[in-house]
Image (spheres, rainbow, N blue to C red):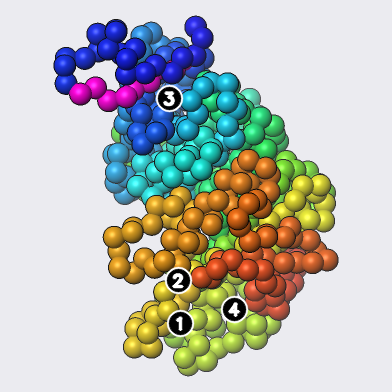
């Protein structure tokens, strides 16, 4: 049946009214069946669209399976539950969680509007599309179809185990959450035209774990051809594997992850995957959720993949925040800081401590800066340099430093932009009723929303009425700074990043690999 956007009049003719005021609603047909959404603020909105079968029962710890076709009209007017996790998302949580949402400004299925696909963060252990900050209406109003996709998190999304690997034709396990994202992007490719979106102009974007996932999808052969641009906010995954992980060195090998899966099963008190699948999700042991190098979804160390040009070469827009470490470290004692640096960095500890010097009053700031750069700054800088060297597509690099000027008597004096602070700016969902939300905040938010949607439209953030954002190159490594205005500047903390780069280079030598074990 030809895709039709039904008006309120059509619904009246079909008898869907009892005389009360009828909201403007719409019906759209996708390959799996008919959907009924709603009209909100000039947009057509569909929430809770299934893009894969519920990953429950025998499908727990399997790659997502195609959703079955349905009869009748599926009501998609509210968010589905988020993935099962320790916290409680606004829409609740369930193991049955593979749903996506669409906000479209299109008035016709023939419009071919560029598409932005959001991947939430949460350390691969939490997150949901229903978070209020992720409401896509304001970005959609700027002329894009906004899609947000869910994925499994925690052990349900990333558990590896020898039995699970044996079940898989590729003889691997784990990375189910990444496979969920890929399945969501395949759904978008097949169906987004019904919403007036352009399946050949899809840009993925995410923050934190979502930004790291964007980085991984850029390196995954399974995601090839599913997107045409990538935006990573506080993401990147260019550190080598390590048995004992640290921020920026988060990845493990399949073998190590499988051994941890054996321990997980033992902790659950069962002796088979079949028994583990029979345990209710709220009775499963807590556990780590993180992607692994499985040689299938993630073929190898991403740094090595980019060095050899083995990645999905699309335009990228990437960056990080000035005080990311404020969310991850509370170190204040100089001895504690020195000890932690020595444990993690080994023979490089001395040079690291020179780059991030210890002082009685500098340690909180020093520790935050090292945490920021190891987990996000070096990752993003490396990504920019590698793609600028080996790729054909443009790189746009930013540094977010929009924050209040805290008074000297405040506990936050000297703090910059914390981890995740940029998200509400990008979605243009700042709290306008908050007296701390300044005119500058709203201007930066509007600017970021414009840059992000321009990038989705043109593969370039530049356009009318925005300051010029030069592409990054290794010969002219310029960034765009967001700090009360948008202006270009050099790579921040460059000398310190270069010291970290020496450490990561050594980690990839036989000596560094042996030491990390």
- The residue at 37%/84% (across/down) is 407
Label 3–label 2 contact, CB within 8 A: no
Q: Is residue 28 magenta?
A: yes
Dot placed on the residue nearer the N-terminal end, 4 or 2: 4
Q: Residues within 10 Å of mark 1 (few under 14, many from 20)?
A: few
In 3D space, how far apart are the residues under numbered discs 1 and 2 (Cα atoms)?
10 Å
Dot placed on the residue nearer the N-terminal end, 1 or 4: 4
Can residue 186 be seen from the camera position used here? no
Counting from the top left corner in percent of width and height, residue 67 is at 47, 19
**Can you identify the residue that label 3 sits on?**
50
Name of the residue lying farthest toward the left: 19
Total number of numbered discs in the rendering: 4
Q: Secondary structure at mark 4?
A: helix
**Can you identify the residue that label 2 sits on?**
403
Disc ID at residue 108: none
Label 1–label 4 contact, CB within 8 A: no
């Amino acid at each position: 049946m030809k895709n039709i956007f039904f008006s309120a009049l059509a619904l009246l003719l079909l008898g869907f009214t009892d005389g009360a005021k009828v909201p403007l609603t719409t019906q759209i047909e996708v390959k799996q069946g008919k959907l009924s959404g709603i009209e909100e603020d000039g947009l057509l909105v569909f929430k809770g669209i299934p893009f894969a079968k519920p990953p429950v029962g025998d499908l727990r710890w399997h790659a997502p399976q195609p959703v079955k076709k349905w009869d009748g009209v599926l009501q998609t007017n509210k968010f589905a539950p988020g993935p099962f996790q320790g916290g409680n998302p606004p829409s609740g949580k369930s193991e049955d969680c593979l749903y996506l949402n669409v906000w479209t400004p299109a008035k016709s299925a023939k419009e071919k509007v560029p598409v932005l696909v959001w991947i939430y963060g949460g350390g691969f252990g939490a997150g949901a599309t229903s978070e209020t900050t992720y409401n896509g209406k304001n970005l959609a109003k700027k002329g894009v179809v906004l899609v947000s996709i869910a994925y499994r998190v925690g052990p349900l999304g990333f558990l590896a185990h020898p039995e699970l690997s044996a079940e898989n034709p590729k003889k691997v396990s784990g990375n189910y959450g990444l496979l969920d994202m890929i399945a969501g992007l395949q759904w978008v490719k097949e169906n987004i035209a019904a919403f007036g979106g352009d399946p050949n102009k899809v840009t993925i974007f995410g923050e934190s774990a979502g930004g790291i996932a964007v980085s991984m999808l850029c390196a995954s052969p399974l995601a090839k051809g599913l997107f045409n641009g990538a935006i990573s906010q506080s993401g990147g995954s260019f550190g080598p594997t390590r048995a004992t992980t640290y921020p920026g060195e988060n990845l493990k090998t399949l073998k190590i992850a499988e051994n941890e899966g054996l321990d997980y099963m033992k902790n659950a008190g069962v002796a088979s995957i079949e028994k583990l699948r029979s345990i209710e999700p709220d009775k499963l042991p807590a556990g780590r959720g993180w992607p692994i190098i499985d040689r299938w979804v993630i073929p190898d160390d991403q740094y090595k993949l980019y060095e050899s040009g083995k990645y999905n070469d699309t335009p990228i827009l990437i960056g990080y925040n000035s005080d990311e470490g404020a969310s991850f470290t509370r170190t204040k004692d100089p001895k504690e800081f020195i000890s932690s640096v020595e444990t993690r960095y080994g023979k490089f500890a001395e040079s690291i401590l020179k780059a991030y010097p210890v002082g009685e009053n500098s340690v909180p700031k020093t520790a935050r800066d090292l945490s920021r750069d190891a987990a996000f700054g070096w990752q993003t800088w490396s990504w920019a340099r590698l793609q600028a060297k080996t790729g054909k597509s443009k790189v746009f690099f930013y540094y977010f430093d929009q924050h209040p000027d805290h008074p000297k008597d405040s506990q936050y004096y000297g703090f910059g932009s914390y981890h995740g602070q940029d998200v509400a700016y990008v979605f243009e969902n700042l709290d306008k009723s908050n007296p701390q939300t300044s005119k500058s905040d709203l201007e930066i938010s509007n600017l970021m929303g414009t840059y992000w949607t321009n990038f989705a439209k043109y593969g370039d953030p530049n356009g009318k009425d925005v300051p010029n954002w030069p592409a990054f190159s290794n010969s002219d490594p310029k960034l765009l700074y967001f700090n009360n205005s948008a202006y270009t500047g050099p790579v921040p903390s460059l000398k310190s990043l270069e010291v970290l780069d020496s450490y990561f280079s050594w980690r990839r030598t036989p000596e560094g690999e042996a030491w990390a074990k």
